[in-house]
Image (cartoon, grey):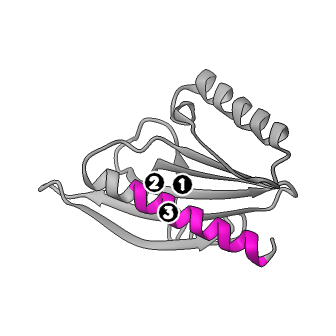
Amino acid sequence: MNMDVTDQVLHLIAKSMSEACSGIAKGAAWVPVVHIIHSLGVHSMRAPGLQAGPVERVKALNEIDHRLSELKGKLVITLADVWIGEDTPDGCAAVSWEIPLSGRRRALVAEVLECSGRRTCCMLKYKRCADGQVLFGELVLGDPSTSSEF
C-alpha cells in the first residue's frame, strides 16, 4: 500500500472504531461496516448479514464481492463486533461469529484485505461491567496469520 492509501485506511479504521465504541458504550449493537477503497474514493456499506446465519453470511459476502468487482476496488476494510475465546498461553484469541459459549468475550475486529490477498487485522477487546460501564482494552495490530496477538 502506498502512503496515501495507508493514511486513508488508518483514518477509516479509526473513525469506524470510534463510532463502534461510542455506540457500544451506549448499549447499541454494532452492525458490521465495510469500506471498499477504489480509484474514485470509498464506498461504505453496512453488512448485517455478516453476523447472521450461514445463508445470510454467504449473501452478504457475495454482495461485498459484487461491489468490489463493480467498483474495481483496491482493498476492503471490514469492522465487526465479534465473540472471542480466552487467550491461549501464546497470546492468541479465537474469533467467532457464532453465539458465544461460556467464557467468551467481545472484541471489535477490523480486517483489511488487499486484492493481492494480503490480510492485516487489528483487534480491540472490551467487556461490559456489572454496572453497565464498558471497558475497552488496547488496540492490537498485526497480521493474523503470523502474529501471536490474535
**Disc 1/disc 2 C-alpha distance (Å):** 5 Å
Q: Is residue 39 left or right of residue 89?
A: right
Residue 111 point in image, percent of width and height: 63, 57
Highlighted magenta segment, given as a residue range: 3-20
Could you classify mark 2 by the number of other residues whose Cα lies within 10 Å: few (under 14), some (14-19), or many (20 or more)? some
Q: Nearer the viewer, residue 111 or 46?
A: 46
**Image quadrant containing the C terminus:** bottom right
Disc 1 secondary structure class: loop
On the image, numbered disc 2 is attached to which residue? 85
Residue that sits furthest to the top in the current view? 55
- Which of 99/48 is in front? 48
Tell me, yes or no, whether the highlighted magenta stretch contains residue 146: no
Asked if residue 44 shows in the view, the reply is yes
Which residue position holds label 3? 15
| Neighbourhood count class around disc 3 (C-alpha, 10 Å): few under 14, some 14–19, many 20 upward | few
SS for tag 2? Answer: loop
Q: Amino acid at mark 1?
A: Ala
Nearer the observer: mark 2 or 3; the answer is 3
Q: Are marks 2 and 3 in contact (CB under 8 Å)?
A: no
- Picture coordinates of residue 146, whole percent (x, y): 71, 70
* Residue 78 point in image, percent of width and height: 61, 50
What amino acid does circle 3 point to? Answer: Lys
Establish if 70 lies above or below 82. above
Decide which of tag 1 and tag 2 comes sooner along the chain. Answer: 2
Kind of residue indicated by mark 2: Gly
Residue receiving disc 1 = 94
- Residue at horizontal 58 percent and vertical 62 percent from the top: 12
Q: Looking at the image, is 47 positioned above or below residue 34? A: above
